[in-house]
Image (tube, rainbow, N blue to C red):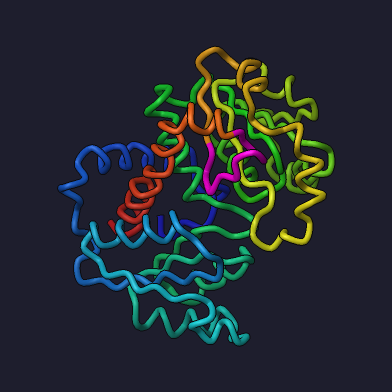
Amino acid sequence: MKNLLSIEELTAKEIEKIVTLAAELKKNRAKSPQVLAGQFWALIFNKSSTRTRVSFEVGIRELGGSPMFMSGADMQLGRGEPAKDTARVMGRMVHGAVIRTYAQTDVEEFARFSGIPTINALTDEEHPCQILADLLTIRQRLGGWKGKRVCFLGDGDCNVARSWIWAAAKLGFELVIGAPKAFQPDAAFMKRVRTKHVRVEENPLKAVAGCDVLYTDVWVSMGKEAESADRIKVLAPYQIDDVLVSAAKKKAIVMHCLPAYRGKEITNDVMEEHAGVIFDQAENRLHAQKAAIVRMVS
């Protein structure tokens, strides 16, 4: 595995290996393998971040490397330099790159022209690091995803939902996308995935029925602020509240990739009741990303 650009590009076997290694690294955090000793890794972020930046900076240091953070405003990329030109320069100076940006094609182009290990830390198309951490959380909380039913509620055509769809297609668990028609997965995208493991349900109560995991994300992602009022109005029935939790399996877990806007996609009471899972999920970003890096450089 040279790069981590998407869940789409990973095999089921590779996903399993990353999650298994992540659990081992979490258990033995004080003895992290120094696979990045003497290496410099660039963190190129065109989108703001809390969990992604902290988890990568800490993870790279724990693996023996030195992270170098650069925002888009700090680089010529912010002035229109093509990603491939930046990539050619960075590839001669650093040993790896973590990129959080808008276009998936920019990350793919950077990986192709830099020749160094490249990680997609979020694009408008996918969020692979988040889903790897989520799978680790599900394994730790439910023993695994085999035979489980996951329900993603809200904007079913966002980057996290698309990565979940790829994960279900690869690993064979059942995924229900609970979303209004305007926010259901793009038809062309679903045709590309071609899986029997994903079902779209407009009725939120029917969507969560029999589910082991209820999952949500912010309704207004970066770049969608102008649509805020309309999104909140249309997505309101898909808020994870006591009613939806009660309609799922008795011991269903609730997950949120954060940041959470309480009173919108999730109620404050549900957020607090399931905080243990949600913040395990946040911590697992560190361990899953370390595992991906170890697989890339070993």
Name the quadrant containing residue 64.
bottom left
- Give the residues in magenta: 256-267
**Prevailing secondary structure of the magenta residues:** loop
- In the visual, does 16 lie left or right of 26? right
- In the visual, does 295 lie left or right of 127? left
Residue 108 % position (x, y) = 56, 66
Q: Residue at x 67, y 41 (%)?
A: 264
Q: Is residue 82 magenta?
A: no
- Decide which of 168, 160 is in the foreground and name it: 160
Residue 227 % position (x, y) = 78, 56
Q: Residue at x 32, y 69 (%)?
A: 67
- Decide which of 258, 135 is in the foreground and name it: 258
- In the visual, does 45 lie left or right of 220? left
Q: Residue at x 39, y 37 (%)?
A: 280
Please, is residue 102 above or below residue 185 in the view?
A: below
Please, is residue 16 above or below residue 83 in the view?
A: above
